[in-house]
Amino acid sequence: MSQDYPQELIEIIVVDGMSTDRTLEIVNRLKKKRPDMKVLMNPKGYKYPALNLALKEAVGDYIAIADAHSLYPRSYIRELAETLDQGKADNVGGGRIFHPRIKGLLAKAITFALTEPFGLCT
């Protein structure tokens, strides 16, 4: 939420997949700062139904998807919007760096699969 893009142009839609951690508590605290934030529930708990719920609610000219457990530079949305405004692309995104929370062969394999162009499964 800490972006250098005009805040009045950013619509925030949070879709919770029936989390059992403190996600909703944190979201409700953030909602006090951004009362216009929309909070939707995704009883299926999977990513793609969550995206569909959010897309149906979105009213902006551009849509940016920001996943949980991800960090974005302050200029992220501004740079995406500027690229789209130049008319040089229909879809833009940023690079990603994965840092697995656990060590071991499985974590390395998952990181490799997520960072290889043919293995990208977002």
Image: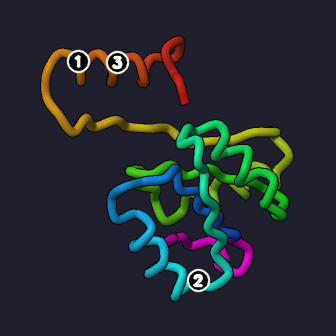
Answer with mark 1 or mark 2, whichever residue precedes in sequence.
2
Quick one: label 3, few (<14), some, or many (20+) residues within 10 Å?
A: some
Of residue 73 and residue 120, the one placed in the foreground of this image is 120
Q: Which secondary structure lies at badge 1?
A: helix
Give the alpha-carbon distance from disc 2 to disc 3, as whole Å: 37 Å
Picture layout, residue 107 above or below residue 12: above
Quarter placement of the C terminus: top right
Residue range (magenta): 1-10
Answer with mark 2 or mark 3, whichever residue precedes in sequence.
2
Residue 98 appears left or right of 43: left
Quick one: label 2, few (<14), some, or many (20+) residues within 10 Å?
A: some
Q: Is residue 34 covered in magenta?
A: no
Answer with mark 3 or mark 1, whichever residue precedes in sequence.
1
Give the alpha-carbon distance from disc 1 to disc 2, as whole Å: 39 Å
Residue located beneath label 2 in the image: 34
Circles 1 and 2 in contact, beta carbons < 8 Å: no
Q: Which secondary structure lies at badge 2?
A: loop
Residue located beneath label 3 in the image: 112
Amino acid type shown at disc 2: Arg
Give the alpha-carbon distance from disc 3 to disc 1, as whole Å: 10 Å
Residue drawn at the location 72% of the way across and 57% of the way down = 81
Amino acid type shown at disc 3: Phe
Residue drawn at the location 33% of the way across and 58% of the way down = 21
Picture layout, residue 31 above or below residue 75: below
Quick one: label 1, few (<14), some, or many (20+) residues within 10 Å?
A: few
Residue 60 appears left or right of 18: right
x and y, in percent, of residue 115 in the image: 42, 23
Residue located beneath label 1 in the image: 106
x and y, in percent, of residue 71 in the image: 41, 55
Residue drawn at the location 54% of the way across and 70% of the way down = 3
